[in-house]
Image (spheres, helix red, strand yellow):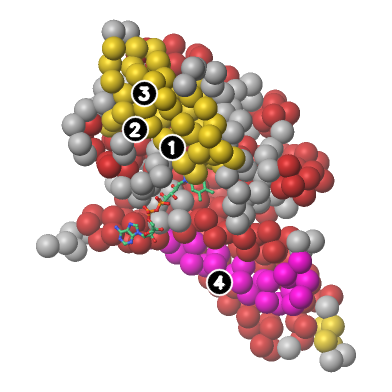
Amino acid sequence: MIARDLFEERTELRQLVRDFTRKEIVPHLDQWERDGELPRELHKKAAALGLLGIGHEDGDLIDSLTVTEEIIQAGGSSGVIAGLFTHGIAIPHILDAGSPDLVERFAKPAMAGNLIGSLAVTEPDGGSDVAAIQTRAVRDGDHYVVNGTKTYITSGCRADFVTTAVRTGEPGYKGVSLLVIEKGTPGFTVQRKLEKMGWHCSDTAELSFVDVKVPARNLVGEENAGFALIMRQFQVERVTMAVEAYATAQRCLDLTVGWTRMRQTFGRPLITRQVVSHKLAEMAQRIDLARTYTREVAVRVMRGEECTAEVCFAKNAAVDACSFVVDAAVQLHGGFGYMRDAEVERHYRDARILGIGGGANEVMTELAARRLGYTE
Ligand SMILES: Cc1cc2nc3c(=O)[nH]c(=O)nc-3n(C[C@H](O)[C@H](O)[C@H](O)COP(=O)(O)OP(=O)(O)OC[C@H]3O[C@@H](n4cnc5c(N)ncnc54)[C@H](O)[C@@H]3O)c2cc1C
């Protein structure tokens, strides 16, 4: 079965997600963008339909990517995906290598929509070089004492727990561990809620840790084995971001086709101009190439095949397609495309992060080059 069929055959799931998005997300999204965060009830509603457990306790990677596609294409956004599915980057390490106790206390309640989790890797001095993190965790009896700062943390303002990358050992990747740090632990504070270009409905925080005593049982897996855990999960995060990119582009294309059929200039609908219809065709072409390739790579990731370079290609290709399409969509909407009332305006701003987060474009290319042996 080809990848497209594997994605398209999930018709019931698609319908469920489309209905959920149109009823529970679209009517409220503008307000959430103004609020700067998603309400907790949304997590509970999504969990009640089983959507937060997909890809973890139910279904497979294709199911979870299908949910991402449909939420965006039905009028949601990549910002909604970031805020509602943050547990998707916060709990996989716990499910992969954490103790049953951590699974019970954090992963399961997050999938039930009762707890919000974040993943904190990035620090003010850098995010691309994960092996260089400086936040320290020093073992003291049955606790670790944590000191440091994390920044740009998605859902960090609301998070009940934060899966935090800390340095427990030597400099470099061999000294990194993951610790789950709970809200309310003395010394752990949300330093700032950060204001951003896009993803307004998804809160982003700077987090401060000053002599925070974290129980040693909150260590995920082995001490100093955190880097490999983080890297393993990046594959899924990056494929998901590639899907966010082509789905955002598809949504913008759909909106732009509708707009150019309706909008008249010089006595004719825009779409009747060849330059416009060709632009729409080019948008469709770039989306289809990105979608076809990304889906193929997603199937390989799901099967556990080694395809690190291809994941990098998929993310970069989908981000390129998305950048082109959101720009063209705003252009063809004219002045309205620049207005906050236009959905394409939001996607234009939201899309900018996709080539930075989860591994910037250049970092993806560098990783692919190394995997392919194009290094000295
Ligand atoms: C809205 C938002 C949400 C985020 N959510 C989270 C989160 O939940 N958890 C988390 O831990 N982090 C999160 N991040 C952080 C994100 O992962 C980092 O911003 C990203 O990894 C880049 O790190 P940096 O910003 O420190 O950029 P830097 O590492 O300083 O790099 C700056 C730029 O330099 C270029 N560059 C970097 N390295 C190279 C290289 N080797 N060769 C060539 N060029 C290079 C790239 O263009 C890069 O964008 C989020 C960021 C944003 C903006």
Tally of marks: 4
Question: Viewer-proximal residue, 61 or 7?
Answer: 61
Identity of the residue drawn at 54% across and 67% down: 323
Looking at the image, the residue that sits furthest to the bottom is 266
Image position of 12 with respect to 285: above or below: above
Distance from disc 3 to disc 1, alpha carbons, whole Å, reads: 12 Å
Dominant SS of magenta comes to helix
First-in-chain label (2 vs 3): 2
Residue 337: image quadrant is bottom right
Identify the magenta region: 313-339
Given contact means CB atoms under 8 Å apart, are the residues at marks 4 and 3 in contact? no
Q: Amino acid at mark 3?
A: Val
How dense is the environment of label 4, judged by Cα within 10 Å: few (below 14), some, or many (20 and up)?
some
First-in-chain label (2 vs 4): 2
Given contact means CB atoms under 8 Å apart, are the residues at marks 2 and 1 in contact? yes
Image position of 53 with respect to 286: above or below: above
Q: Is residue 365 left or right of residue 316?
A: left
Q: Is residue 169 left or right of residue 329?
A: left
Q: Name the element at disc 4.
A: helix
Residue 169: image quadrant is top left
Distance from disc 2 to disc 3, alpha carbons, whole Å, reads: 7 Å
Looking at the image, the residue that sits furthest to the top is 141
Q: Write down the residue under mark 2.
A: 135
Q: Which mark is residue 150?
A: 1
Distance from disc 2 to disc 4, alpha carbons, whole Å, reads: 38 Å
Question: Viewer-proximal residue, 27 or 239?
Answer: 27
